[in-house]
Amino acid sequence: MNSIAEPTTVGVIGAGIVGLSVAVQLQRDGYRVTVIDRDEPMQACSAGNAGYLSEANIFPPAAPDMLLQLPKLLLANDGPLVIRPAYAPKMMSWGRHALSVVKGDVRAMVTRTLASMTVQAYAMIETLATYAGAAQLLSRDGGLVAFKNAQALDKKCELLNVWHRHGIQVHRLSDAAIQALEPALSREIVGGLFFENSGRCSNPRRLGLIYAEHLVRNGGEVVRDQVNGVSSQSDGGVIVRGAIEDRRFANVVVCAGFWSEELLHSHFKSIPIASERGYHLMLPNAGLSLKRPVVFGEPHFAATPMDEGLRLAGTAEFASADAPPNMQRAEMLLRLARQYLAPIDETGAKPWMGVRPSLPDGLPAIGTVPGQPGLHYAFGHAHNGLTLSAVTAKCVSAQLQRAAAPIDLTPFDLMRFERGYFSSKQPRATNAL
């Protein structure tokens, strides 16, 4: 281990899509980057992403009607969201903060902040993917939300004015218009929403692997090691303590998803992150064709055409990260999909589970540890990791350079959970465009 860290060295902990995006962006901006992960790149949550670069997800995760259903969710086995009873006590802090964002000015501020990221997200991921040689994996043919229930569609359309106010191009479609766009959908579809500027990644895992290959090809490193701790040094730099080797860098960025809390808990009184496990079912020969991601409005999951077939994804389960997976959650998606799509061939179907890092207000954590000027973090993107990966990378790079970020980073500071983030004294988020 070097006794003095060279000023341009950066260690990025985590080889998921956020960590690899940060690494490639920093390398592009002149830094010498080493990515450290206990596993090979793109082995965790990022690998199973639905591939939907959505512009719809600008709202906090908790809504009043969802919170009223929490007792029912504790007992449900086949709903879009379940909470395993054993995990309920660990959800107390998460739930307390989620309640603070349900309504009023705070909800509006979170929505405005997420929208300010989202409207820039596709352009930035396209730029980063093109730079790394992965542009062929991206497309922008919009995204559909399809409904079989007119009342549910009417309820969703109440949000149209909010999306429009934040610059998101979305409009209501008739059943005939939906059929024209996606003939494989059931004739029972009554209508839906079309997000014109949403996009798709046809192979999220491959995107991250191309990023890793590009990083190494241009002088960066990707190393496997179990990180046991990080600490700033009084004489400058940050030590990453690994099971195999300790490494010293001028700056370190923690992008370890749900496991970031383990590395940062000693620096914060509260990091209310939850293990929100997502399941998908990969159908290599589905026997039908979609042109774009389609979200099914009532059961709240998506079908996305991938290079490897059709991916059904989106179910959420709050449970311990290391609890045995319940693959019936993945198989449930096939039963639901058959209600919305033409006959599906399930031959060779492969279930999968990964752990999403979920913070209670829906905002990721992006910032610098107080009193630790070289120690930074970017994690907690929940369902939006792929979508917001490149804009997050630009924010982190700007932070290290002490330059203007694409958006106001104040609301993403982890200290929001300690210092009264939800008070009137908290600075409002602004769109820096």
Image (cartoon, rainbow, N blue to C red):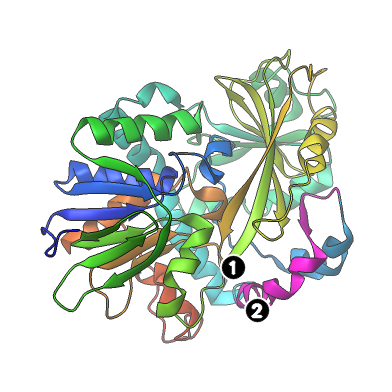
Find the magenta span and give its range.
Answer: 78-100
Residue name at image x 54 percent, y 34 percent: 51
Q: Give how far across and how far down residue 234 sits, in percent.
A: 18, 79
**Vertical placement of residue 274 versus 141, above or below:** below
**Image location (x, y in percent) of residue 73:** 83, 61
Tell me the residue that label 1 is attached to: 360
Whether residue 84 sits left or right of residue 133 in the image: it is right
Residue type marked 1 = Pro
Q: Nearer the viewer, residue 324 or 122?
A: 324
Task: Please say whether residue 85 is one of the residues in the magenta stretch.
Answer: yes
Residue 308's image quarter?
A: top right
As displayed, is residue 410 above or below residue 30? Answer: below
Q: Is residue 129 left or right of residue 84?
A: left
Q: Nearer the viewer, residue 216 or 206?
A: 216
Which is nearer the eye, 394 or 103?
Answer: 394
Binning the other alpha carbons within 10 Å of mark 1 as few (below 14), some (14 to 19) or many (20 upward) gives many
Mark 2 and mark 1: Cα distance apart in space = 8 Å
Look at the image and tell me whether residue 382 can be seen. Answer: yes
Is disc 2 placed on a helix, strand or loop?
A: helix
- Amino acid at pointer 2: Arg
User: In this image, 355 relative to 149: left or right?
Assistant: left
Query: What residue does disc 2 label?
Result: 96
Give the mark, 2 or 1, whose residue is nearer the N terminus. 2
In the rendered image, residue 176, in percent from the top left (x then y), is placed at: 73, 23
Q: Are marks 2 and 1 in contact (CB under 8 Å)?
A: yes
Q: Is residue 260 above or below residue 299?
A: below
Could you say whether the residue bearing mark 1 is in a helix, strand or loop? Answer: loop
Instruction: Give the residue drawn at x 49%, y 79%.
Output: 417
